């Protein structure tokens, strides 16, 4: 049960993760966002234990990979519905509408299509802020500073009232 | 930073050789791509360590230099990349003084690199500082952002024949509101300046670095002054102060536009021992005239990110102007891919087939 974890207290907002993701996948799935007071932060999929996107999709196009626990999108099942329920449901703004005519919805797949190389963004982060971790180990890597910075990001960008699980 | 994120180990050599000039984020990312594709890569940099501005510009508490060093070491030890440090690559133009030039021991020509390699990629960043065009800007004690920061960062390597500004106990005035200005204020505070003021023409809400940075700098002891424009730098033998005038936004005109007007009659002098004008750097490609960089920017070239010299490619801030690490990384990766495709098609004698392929707008971003 793995997920990507970003320590927002170490992140300097340089956008390398987004760039690398874009280079590998054409449409980036980790996206830089700017808060009203000028702070640049990436938003990304947390591969939640209880994913809201999965529940919102009536076509069952979003599923959990049994081997890794990654939350994945099955392109063939995505009906490209006009309401885009998954986009609305995700509290982390991590379901992406690319605007492409074919397959307009995309999401992070932990780079499972890279032949075992793992997420491309994490090793390139100049601040060692991004990592691939097991859900069970999340508490070990979350420092008080990281948690504080994360709360700030949530207040600024991610709907603070929305429950996350 | 693991620049070889595209492969799991050193591949079979493909018999091709490239030279990368500049070991900043764009050059190192391209190196990783090409090393993963089997190229023999040589990386030239005028500085004693790889990393470019990530090591010699951005403060160590934001990016740990060890993190970059580890990435470069992997390239060298595991992928056989050759780093030729303290080596400046020069073109035909007269030597111009760029920041960091004093650290180079060896000078080599761009022409030589082109002859010795299948292709060359120029990733030399923006190391020539733009000075603000106000009277007095040439007075001693006036620095550009990089001129001020570089010696502070490089002092741990060597300080002989380097103009390290004496900061302790001095009054420092910083003009600008970008990330460089913020780092200068930070460095001045850390080095023990007696007073550090950050001055910006507009309000903090309009600052490129964002209002949060202003608020944080104030907490750390800096004085932030908004709505003030510099008129001149005053002093006889060296800088003694800066004359500022208030800047006000006019009411919207008929077209709904607000104008920034400088109220010269209300000008005042702020005392200063050091003035840093952090208003941006410029690109520094060796061989600037022959590369036709404007055409590369517009996509008016034979091949994506190839300069007007055959087999010479370009990437990073030297092409785009000062940006961010992410943008430089993307540019480096894209140039490396383009270079690889070009050489492959050239080897197959198939370049003509693709010569007329239009470079799309989105490819240039
Ligand atoms: C003070 C400061 C703070 C910054 N803070 C941030 C930040 O917080 N986040 C962010 O994303 N970006 C930041 N940036 C911007 C970022 O550092 C740059 O956009 C990025 O480093 C550009 O990468 P590059 O590879 O194009 O060039 P550079 O990093 O400039 O690397 C170019 C390299 O080429 C070498 N070189 C140049 N000419 C020659 C030559 N003739 N021969 C041999 N070698 C040569 C140089 O020594 C250098 O190592 C900051 C910049 C500055 C100045
Ligand atoms: S690469 Fe790392 S430091 Fe840069 S924006 Fe992404 S997470 Fe933040």
Image (spheres, coloured by chain):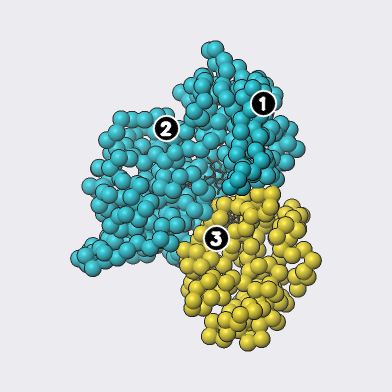
Chain colours: A yellow, B cyan
Query: Please, what secondary structure does the residue beneath circle 2 have?
Result: loop
Q: Is residue B353 above or below residue B204?
A: below
Does mark 3's beta carbon lie closer than 8 Å to ligand 2?
Answer: yes
Same chain letter for marks 3 and 1? no
Residue that mark 3 sits on: A18
Along the viewing direction, whichever of B92 and A129 lies nearer the viewer = B92
- Are dots 1 and 2 in contact, CB under 8 Å? no
Q: Chain of mark 2?
A: B
Residue at coordinates 59% horizontally, 62% vertically from top-left?
Answer: A31
- Which residue, given by chain and number where applicable, does mark 1 sit on? B193
Quadrant into which the C terminus of chain A falls: bottom right
The quarter of the rendered structure image containing the N terminus of chain A is bottom right
Taking A134 as reference, is A123 left or right?
Answer: left
Quadrant in the rendering for residue A48: bottom right
Residue sitting at x 64%, y 22%: B265
Callout 2: CB less than 8 Å from ligand 1: yes
Relative to residue B223, is residue B319 depicted above or below?
below
Q: CA distance from mark 1 to mark 2?
A: 26 Å
The disc at residue B98 is: 2
Q: Are marks 3 and 2 on the same chain?
A: no
Q: Image point 52% across, 54% down: which residue? A: B326
Q: Crowding at label 1, few (<14), some or many (≥20) Cα neighbours within 10 Å?
A: some
Instruction: Evaluate if marks 3 and 2 touch, with contact meaning CB atoms under 8 Å apart.
Output: no
Distance from disc 3 to disc 2, alpha carbons, whole Å, reads: 31 Å
Question: What is the x, y in percent for residue A135?
Answer: 69, 70
Chain under callout 3: A
Residue B184 seen in the figure:
no
Residue A91, image quadrant: bottom right
Q: Disc 1 or 2, which lies upstream in sequence?
A: 2
* Relative to B363, residue B248 above or below: above
């Amino acid at each position: 049960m793995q997920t990507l974890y970003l320590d927002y207290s170490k992140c300097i907002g340089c956008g390398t993760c987004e760039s690398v993701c874009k280079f590998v996948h054409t449409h980036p799935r980790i996206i830089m966002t700017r808060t009203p007071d000028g702070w640049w932060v990436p938003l990304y999929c947390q591969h939640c234990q209880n994913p809201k996107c999965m529940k919102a999709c009536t076509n069952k196009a979003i599923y959990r990979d049994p081997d890794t626990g990654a939350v994945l999108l099955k392109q063939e099942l995505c009906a490209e519905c006009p309401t885009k329920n998954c986009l609305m449901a995700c509290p982390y703004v991590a379901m992406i509408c690319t605007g492409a005519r074919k397959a307009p919805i995309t999401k992070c797949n932990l780079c499972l299509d890279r032949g075992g190389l793992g997420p491309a963004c994490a090793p390139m982060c100049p601040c060692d802020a991004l990592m691939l971790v097991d859900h069970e180990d999340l508490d070990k890597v979350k420092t008080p500073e990281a948690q504080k910075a994360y709360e700030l990001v949530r207040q600024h960008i991610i709907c603070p009232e929305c429950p996350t699980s | 930073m693991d620049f070889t994120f595209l492969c799991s180990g050193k591949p079979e050599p493909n018999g091709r050789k490239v030279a990368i000039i500049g070991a900043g984020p764009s050059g190192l990312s391209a190196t990783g791509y090409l090393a993963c594709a089997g190229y023999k890569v040589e990386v030239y940099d005028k500085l004693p360590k790889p990393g470019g501005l990530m090591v010699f510009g951005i403060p160590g508490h934001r990016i740990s230099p060890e993190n970059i060093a580890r990435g470069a070491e992997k390239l060298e030890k595991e992928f056989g990349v050759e780093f030729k440090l303290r080596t400046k690559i020069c073109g035909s133009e007269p030597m111009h003084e760029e920041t960091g030039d004093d650290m180079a021991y060896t000078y080599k020509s761009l022409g030589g690199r082109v002859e010795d390699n299948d292709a060359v990629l120029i990733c030399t960043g923006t190391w020539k500082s733009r000075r603000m065009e106000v009277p007095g800007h040439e007075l001693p004690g006036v620095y550009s952002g990089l001129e001020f920061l570089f010696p502070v960062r490089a002092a741990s390597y060597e300080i002989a024949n380097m103009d390290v500004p004496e900061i302790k106990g001095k009054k420092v005035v910083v003009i600008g509101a970008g990330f460089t200005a913020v780092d200068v204020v930070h460095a001045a505070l850390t080095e023990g300046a007696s007073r550090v003021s950050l001055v910006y023409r507009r309000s903090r809400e309009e600052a490129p670095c964002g209002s949060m940075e202003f608020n944080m700098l104030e907490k750390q002891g800096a004085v932030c002054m908004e709505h003030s424009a510099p008129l001149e730098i005053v002093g006889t033998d060296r800088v003694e102060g800066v004359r500022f005038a208030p800047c006000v936004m006019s009411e919207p005109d008929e077209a709904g536009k607000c104008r920034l007007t400088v109220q010269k009659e209300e000008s005042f002098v702020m005392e200063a021992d050091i003035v840093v004008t952090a208003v941006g750097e410029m690109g520094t490609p060796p061989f600037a005239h022959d590369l036709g960089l404007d055409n590369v920017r517009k996509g008016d070239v034979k091949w994506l990110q190839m300069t007007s010299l055959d087999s010479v490619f370009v990437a990073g801030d030297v092409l785009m102007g000062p940006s961010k690490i992410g943008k430089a990384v993307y540019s480096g990766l894209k140039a490396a891919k383009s270079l690889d495709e070009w050489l492959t098609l050239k080897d197959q004698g198939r370049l003509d087939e693709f010569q007329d392929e239009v470079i799309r707008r989105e490819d240039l971003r």
